Amino acid sequence: MLIRDIASLAVVPPGPLAGEKMRDVNIIQDAAVLIEDGRLVWFGLAKDAPADKGGPALSAEGGCVIPGLIDPHTHIPFAGHRAAEFARRIAGESYLSIMESGGGIRVTTQAVREASEEELVELNLPRLRRMLALGVTTCECKSGYGLAPKHELKQLHAIRELNRRQPIELVPTYLGAHALPAEFEGRADEFIDRIGSEALLQQIASEGLARFCDVFCDRGAFTVEQARRVLTRAAKVGLKPKLHADELAQIGATRLAGEVHAVSADHLETIDEGGIAALKEAGTIAVVLPGTSFFLGIEHCDVHRLINAGLPVALSTDCNPGSSMIESLPLIMNIACCQLRMPPVEVLSAVTANAAAAIDLHGRLGAIEKGYDADLVILDAPTLDEWFYTPGRNRVKAVIKHGEVVYKA
Ligand code: NIG
Ligand code: FE
């Protein structure tokens, strides 16, 4: 298939793109793209396009074409909602105090435990369909609301089923150590040994139910020592480490991310210089979640400090019912641009090349590069700048996943 009439093609190189390299996006005006067997085989100036071999053509109608968007950190699938907590927070209560008073993650755990696997699938399918219409072609999904082996496995099975039933490619992460369930109050170490047992991790890895293991390592969640225990065992069976780090307080979680060579360290609102150095040395991707700070009304992560230090930064929704009930990666991109003052090309690199690196798929996703998967978004704006200039308006005209048109506005 030849895509023609592209006003501008945003050629993002393969990630990870560290520091100032995030701006190295080459814009080709009046471009075309050739796709064969689901892969990009040629791109360049339209006038140089290979001779028409009679294959199908698709007109971008003067739109900008970008790589498919990648959301590298979500808590999909979940059940229920926490709108009452949202109202309490708007009235002044903090996320941490609501969590300490019995609200927070435990409330969603109740709802997820009550839902069947099929119910989890049915509840989250519409969400993924809405995300597809916003240009998302790949999405990381975490367990972490079951908080008991049976319910964690149910969530992971729901992710597998959701992956089969809709076009977005889902990449599963096991987050059993997300919160301490009520029945383990005062027995966190015991819970960690249950949820992070070698047998359970081995089962998850050997059945291909997850590729990564994540831990919420923070004040009010799990300690560095507990997180280390889970992640080290997980790594032994091939589940690569990730961390929820430095969100609510500075307890040394990013240093641990460096120590275990985490693929990504996510949140980072309270990261310090030692944490930055640790991530840099380990080659860990810094995943910044400005939707969470927007939704919780807390200070945004100082993303320029990370980029200036030479870290590859990715952006994500953190879509979850407590701290970021936001499905829209384009909204996150607009927050990053308008409030974090990241230029559009930097934001684009963060949700394509670097987002792919945050889920260890930068060898085939997140770039406009020969041989890469043909995951593309056609916009009804002629340039990136015009797209970013109109927050709140969905300007996605078509979405292509692995060479197939899977969504048309
Ligand atoms: O990434 N920080 C930990 N976990 C989620 C919040 C989950 C919830 O509140 O349900 C997050 O923000
Ligand atoms: Fe999260």
Image (cartoon, rainbow, N blue to C red):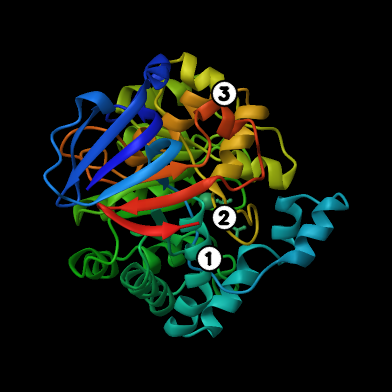
Residue 387 picture location, percent across and down: 56, 34
Identify the residue shown where x is 59% and y is 68%: 185
- Which three-letter amino acid code belongs to the residue tagged 3? Met
Q: Is residue 270 visible?
A: no
The answer to whether residue 329 is visible is yes
Q: Residue 342 carries which label?
A: 3
Mark 3 surroundings within 10 Å by alpha-carbon count, few (fewer than 14), some (14 through 19), many (20 or more): some
Circle on res. 127: 1
Q: Where does residue 296 sit, x and y in percent of width and height?
A: 72, 46
Q: Residues within 10 Å of mark 1 (few under 14, many from 20)?
A: some
Queried on whether the Cβ of the residue with tag 3 lies below 8 angstroms from ligand 2, the answer reads: no
Cα gap from disc 1 to disc 3, whole angstroms: 27 Å
* Residue that carries the numbered disc 2 in the rendered image: 327
At 39% from the left and 54% from the top, the residue drawn is 140
Label total for image: 3
Q: Earlier in the sequence, mark 2 or mark 1?
A: 1
- Among the two numbered marks 3 and 2 on one chain, the one whose residue lies closer to the N terminus: 2
For disc 2, the neighbor class at 10 Å (few under 14, some 14 to 19, many from 20) is many
Q: Is residue 57 left or right of residue 74?
A: left
Q: Is mark 1 on a helix, strand or loop?
A: helix
- In screen coordinates, is 323 left or right of 113? right
State the SS at label 2: loop
